[in-house]
Amino acid sequence: MKAFLLAAGFGTRLRPITDTIPKCLVPIKGHPLLAWWLQLLQKHGVTEVLINTHYLPEPVRSFIKTYNAKQTGLTVFEAYEPELLGSGGTIRANRDFVKGEKDFLICYADNLTDADLTSFRRLHEMRGSLLTMALFHTNVPEQCGIAELNAEGRIVEFVEKPKRPKTDLANAGMYIADGRIFDYLEPDKTPLDFGKDVLPKLVGQMYGWNTEGYLIDIGTMENYKRANEEWVHDYNEDSSEN
């Protein structure tokens, strides 16, 4: 299986840390966030990952070069964006990366998670849906993309930051999609945002998967500190990091 790992953000809320370190490489328990992501993806059978870059790309390139040299069984590619394309725009621009793939992962590297991606994929394959969205319960639904599911687990409504949320099931920033997704990526819109521009079009055609694993967006200083306090996993030194 292949995966897109969206990692090109500026990380402005993590300054001054991100003045010199791209957000995707900030350390969690002594190891770059990307290292934790690649360990998770490798564990669940992903063989190729495409990481998009924009801000401070050189440290990410160095990380990727070091990682690939270790020949872990997971190969990492970079897609540099001189101008940010948006989460949906990155997928659209790199369609050839997943050419011939039945399904593929899309993940936001802003998050730290130990989600069971194998179970995630199993549900997606069982449903045969165009897209399956990972969900989690949030106590601040007004600040998230919120999904409403029917009894079958089909997403019947999705609203970004609703003023009156109907549920507390929030978008976890992880999707499994099949090739039909490219029919919903507007060719001329840049930046193209996956949450705002694409997901609302998929209501009624996508399913939700409830992750019970650890998940936190490390994009604020408060959450970054929490992640470093709460993260309990060991890093496999046989994997690579810069």
Image (tube, grey):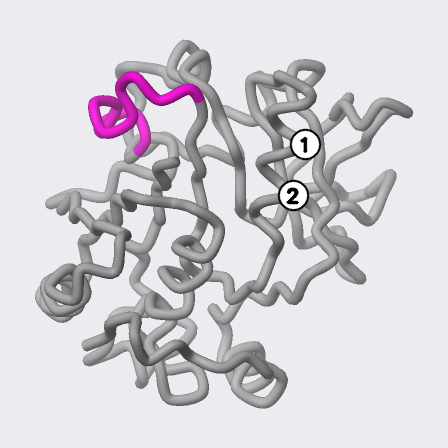
The stretch drawn in magenta includes residue 97: yes
The residue drawn where x is 50% and y is 80% is 224
Residue ID for mark 1: 123
Residue 212 appears in which quarter of the rendering? Answer: bottom right
Distance CA(mark 1)–CA(mark 2)? 6 Å
Give residue 185's position: percent from left, percent from top.
Answer: 38, 18
Residue ID for mark 2: 119
Is residue 215 toward the left or the right of residue 112 in the image? right
Q: Which mark is residue 165?
A: none
Question: Regarding mark 1 in the picture, which secondary structure is present there?
Answer: helix
- The kind of residue tagged 1 is Leu
Range shown magenta: 91-102
Q: Can you say which quadrant of the picture contains the N terminus? A: top left
Is residue 239 toward the left or the right of residue 64 in the image? right
Q: Nearer the viewer, residue 104 or 184?
A: 104
Give residue 150's position: percent from left, percent from top.
Answer: 87, 24
The residue drawn where x is 63% and y is 34% is 122
Q: Which of 165 and 214 is in front in this view?
A: 214
Other-residue count near label 2 (Cα within 10 Å), few / some / many at <14 / 14–19 / ≥20: few
